[in-house]
């Protein structure tokens, strides 16, 4: 499972960067997630379905990232906590680089904790826990 999950997040990184370049493939994005999922952050816990609404929200999300100057997302590291033969928590460290017209580019490091399940032999995200992205972006003068 460990090798499969590491390769999965390398694929996720490549997908994210293609999407930042304007080449969002909503079907590929959907293939990274389980049919249902949960997300937790400062605003609370939400659940959702991997459906057309989710795909549309992700297309809009990447447009927002481009609007605020997100140039690149780099996978800095992954630490896995195995739960059982089919589940793990992936603690993923990311570095996001933002272009700013008035100042040099800035890179912001952050972590997201993903709940991953092996479905039909392939990893799929069924949940994530993230920090306060908005506060971090304000702290670094991005927004």
Image: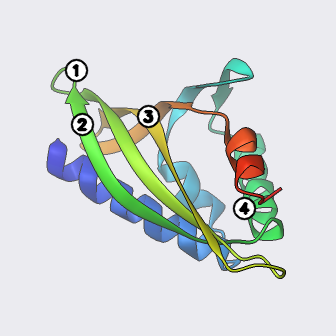
Identify the residue under disc 3. Answer: 113
- Nearest to viewer (mark 3 / mark 1): 3
Identify the residue under disc 4. Answer: 62
**In the depicted view, which residue is nearer to us: 4 or 129?**
129
| Quadrant placement of the C terminus | bottom right
Q: Dot 3: what SS?
A: strand
Kindly report the distance in space between the C-alpha atoms of the residues bearing marks 3 and 4: 20 Å
Percent position of residue 85, x then y: 15, 26
Question: Looking at the rendering, which quadrant does residue 105 occupy?
Answer: bottom right
- Nearest to viewer (mark 2 / mark 4): 2
Identify the residue under disc 1. Answer: 83
Are circles 2 and 3 on residues that touch, CB within 8 Å? no
Kindly report the distance in space between the C-alpha atoms of the residues bearing marks 2 and 4: 26 Å
Q: Residues within 10 Å of mark 3 (few under 14, many from 20)?
A: many
Percent position of residue 45, x then y: 66, 17
Answer with mark 3 or mark 4, whichever residue precedes in sequence. 4
- Nearest to viewer (mark 3 / mark 4): 3
Percent position of residue 86, x then y: 23, 28
Identify the residue under disc 2. Answer: 80
Q: Dot 4: what SS?
A: helix
| For residue 32, side relative to residue 78 (left or right) | right
The residue at 40%/61% (across/down) is 75
Answer with mark 3 or mark 1, whichever residue precedes in sequence. 1
**In the depicted view, which residue is nearer to us: 53 or 127?**
127
Are circles 3 and 1 on residues that touch, CB within 8 Å? no
Kindly report the distance in space between the C-alpha atoms of the residues bearing marks 2 and 3: 10 Å
Answer with mark 2 or mark 3, whichever residue precedes in sequence. 2
The residue at 65%/60% (across/down) is 26
Q: Residues within 10 Å of mark 1 (few under 14, many from 20)?
A: few
């Amino acid at each position: 499972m460990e090798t499969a999950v590491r390769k999965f997040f390398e694929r996720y990184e490549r997908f994210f960067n293609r999407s930042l370049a304007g080449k969002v493939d909503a079907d590929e994005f959907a293939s990274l997630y389980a049919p249902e999922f949960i997300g937790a952050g400062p605003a609370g816990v939400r659940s959702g379905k991997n459906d057309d609404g989710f795909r549309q929200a992700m297309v809009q999300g990447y447009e927002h990232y481009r609007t605020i100057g997100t140039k690149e997302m780099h996978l800095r590291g992954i630490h896995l906590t195995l739960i059982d033969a089919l589940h793990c928590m992936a603690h993923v460290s990311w570095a996001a680089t933002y272009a700013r017209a008035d100042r040099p580019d800035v890179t912001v490091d952050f972590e997201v904790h993903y709940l991953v399940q092996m479905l039909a032999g392939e990893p799929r995200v069924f949940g994530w826990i993230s920090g306060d992205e908005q506060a971090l972006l304000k702290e670094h003068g991005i927004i």
